[in-house]
Image (spheres, rainbow, N blue to C red):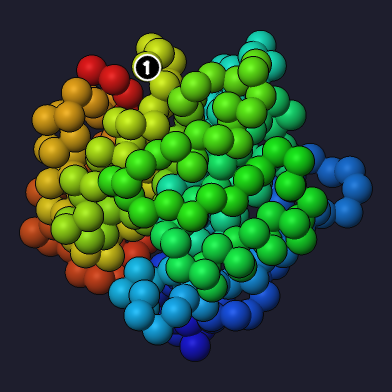
Amino acid sequence: MSASLQTLYDYIPISHSTPGSIFPYTIKRDGGGSEPRQITLQTPDTQASNWSLHASSIWQSSIHIADHIEYLQLDRFSDRKILSVLELGAGAGLPSIMIALNTPNAAVVVSDYPDENIICTLSDNVRRNHASERCWTVPYAWGSDISPLLKPVQQNPEGSALFDIIVAADTLWNPETHVQFINTLCMCLNRTPDARVYLVAGLHTGRYTLQSFMNAVVMHKLQVERVVEREVVDGVQRPWDVTRAEGEDERERRKWVVWIILKWA
């Protein structure tokens, strides 16, 4: 039914798969060559008490990151022996697995809320796709002690103490978690001029929710380096504009994801 929404009603699906099911993602290629590579993911099914996390889907934002991994500009760090990457609120872990498989110097920590079902599924997805050598699963609740996140990268003396790149897909829909999330970003982001946070979010709870997050960021010594809207299907790009909320319906909101890039002020 979700897949048919686009064909029948011009409704772009914002999530894919169902809890516990297998979702195959085909890695896009620039040219010809061998058979297309796939990442095979099991969709998490949270414990009943954590249903409100909405972690039991493959969200369009995570697919958009995987489709456009070049937007993360990871090649800027190609001269480093270790590029430390963190994904927060990872769900099935598609962006992290994609980065681990395609970035030779990446050391990736993939995390989500300490729900046993989510973490077990996330760990299985990493192993299933042969990414365990460069990708480690860590349970983590935003705003708490970050030392468990740091242990995997600190085991390598050539890596940085914190994370050069932080990635998150669809983690801004609930304004009640913004402060904890921002605190985690500030604790985890490497204190270097080239460290970046890449956040990709749908418009599920409206533009004002995203704008309130960006307003809160500046109170924590971070700044928005860039924010753009990208169309899911055609790749059209346009500047962020919160006032579009006045004329948008749900069908229009589904067509776009918002890329927010943060750095230290």
Tell me: residue 152, above or below residue 128: above
Q: Nearer the viewer, residue 121 or 10?
A: 121
The three-letter code of the residue at mark 1 reads Arg
**Residue 184 can be seen, yes or no:** yes
Q: Quadrant of the C terminus?
A: top left
Tell me: residue 230, above or below residue 105: below
Residue 11 lies in quadrant? bottom left
Q: Nearer the viewer, residue 240 or 138?
A: 138
Residue in the picture at 35% in, 80% down: 49
Residue in the picture at 64% in, 28% down: 155
**Does 8 sit left or right of 252 as displayed?**
right
> Which residue is most to the right?
34
**Does 75 sit left or right of 3 as displayed?**
right
- Whole-percent x, y for residue 264 in the image: 29, 20
Tell me: residue 28, above or below residue 86: below
Q: How many numbered circles does the render carry?
A: 1
**Residue 236 can be seen, yes or no:** no
Callout 1 secondary element: loop
Residue 32 lies in quadrant? top right
Tell me the residue that label 1 is attached to. Answer: 191
- Whole-percent x, y for residue 21 in the image: 63, 80
- Whole-percent x, y for residue 102 in the image: 71, 37
**Does 85 sit left or right of 140 as displayed?**
right
